[in-house]
Image (cartoon, rainbow, N blue to C red):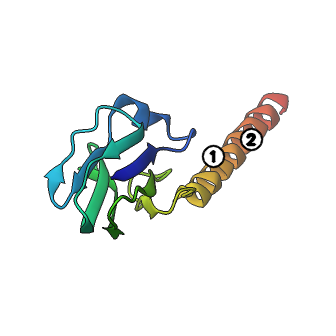
Amino acid sequence: MLAISLAYPPSAFVYRATKPRLLVDGVDVGVARWGKHRVPVTVGRHRVQVWVPYVMPRKAGRAQMDISVSDGEVASIAYMAPAVTFARGSLGAPGQKSTGLPTVMVLNAIAIVVAVAALLVLLVANLA
């Protein structure tokens, strides 16, 4: 059995409008939502792929890994979608972190600085 948790960072609310795609050994598992899922698999090695359908890129947050499942074992893995759709997703042991979050934070800081500068320019122009 394969237990997989599919998640996205709270700041990337755009993912709420879609659902992730999960493939095991090239076969679409057909998950209906984000969250925890259990997928029956045979004993042995399996390739797991996850991405989010999106406009650009078509497969946002792609990630894949190979995992071995022993007899009677429940192999647990987790997927975290990236904060930026062009970044790779994180797939591995439970507790995955979102990639691209530092980029989002820098872009937010730049946007705030530009907005504050524009307000200051408007204030100075109105005072003159």
Looking at the rendered structure, the secondary structure element under dot 2 is helix
Q: Which residue lies under the disc numbered 2?
A: 116
Q: Residue at position x 28%, y 43% from top?
A: 54
Is disc 2 surrounded by few (<14), some (14 to 19) or many (20+) residues within 10 Å? few
Q: Residue at position x 29%, y 32% from top?
A: 32
Q: Which residue lies under the disc numbered 1?
A: 111
Residue 46 vertical position relative to residue 20 in the rendered view, above or below: below
Question: In terms of sequence position, does the residue under pointer 2 or pointer 1 come before the other?
Answer: 1
Q: Amino acid at mark 2?
A: Val
Farthest residue, direction left: 27
Per the model, the C-alpha gap separating discs 2 and 1 is 9 Å
The disc placed on residue 33 is none
Q: Residue at position x 18%, y 61% from top?
A: 25
Residue 24 shows up from this direction: yes
Closer to the camera, 106 or 83? 83
Looking at the rendered structure, the secondary structure element under dot 1 is helix
Q: Amino acid at mark 1?
A: Ala
Residue 107 placement, left or right of 123:
left
Closer to the camera, 111 or 45? 45
Farthest residue, direction front: 72
Q: Quadrant of residue 118?
A: top right
Residue 24 placement, left or right of 100:
left
Residue 57 shows up from this direction: no
Foreground disc of the pair 2, 1: 1
